[in-house]
Image (tube, rainbow, N blue to C red):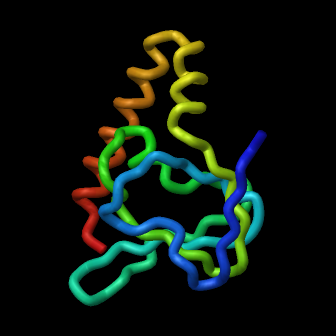
Amino acid sequence: MAQYKEYRAKEKVLIEGEESNELYYIAKGTLRVLLTRGDDNKQLATLHPGEVVGEMSFLDKKSRSASVEAISDSVLQVIERQAYEDFLSSLPPWFISLQNTLIDRLRNANSRVDV
């Protein structure tokens, strides 16, 4: 059975630098992705229903690369690490390699972007 979490507008969903064991599917609402630079928060993206959030740190098991907060009241479906790993075990090994390569390339590209 799927688990859901509800967030109010302006409530933090993810915090940059924290550890990750969950990925979220946006069922309802709108979120903003924020990157902290000094005392300033830069908005990187706006996310809508049907999108996922928290995927990078969830997949590569590194800390969160950005913060996320709700713009409007939101409902997110929780995807836990163990459920995802059970799913991955049914796939061919090359798929995991592909996933890891894409995440490494995305993290490297993000580290070169000046916000």
Q: Nearer the viewer, residue 34 or 44?
A: 34
Q: Position of residue 93 (x, y in %)?
A: 45, 12
List x then y, in percent, for residue 70: 60, 76
| Closer to us: 45 or 72 | 72
Q: 30 or 11: which is nearer to us?
A: 11
Residue 100: name its quadrant: top left
Residue name at image x 53 percent, y 16 percent = 89
Image coords of residue 54 (percent x, y): 49, 54
Above-or-below relation of 93 to 45: above
Q: Residue furthest top?
A: 92
Could you say where residue 68 lies in the image, as x and y percent from the top left? 49, 70
Q: Quadrant of the N terminus?
A: top right
Q: In screen coordinates, is 34 left or right of 108?
A: right
For the C terminus, the quadrant is bottom left
Q: Residue furthest bottom?
A: 39
Identified at 44% across, 44% down, the residue is 58
- Judge whether 72 appears above or below 82 on screen: below
Left or right: 48 in relation to 64: right
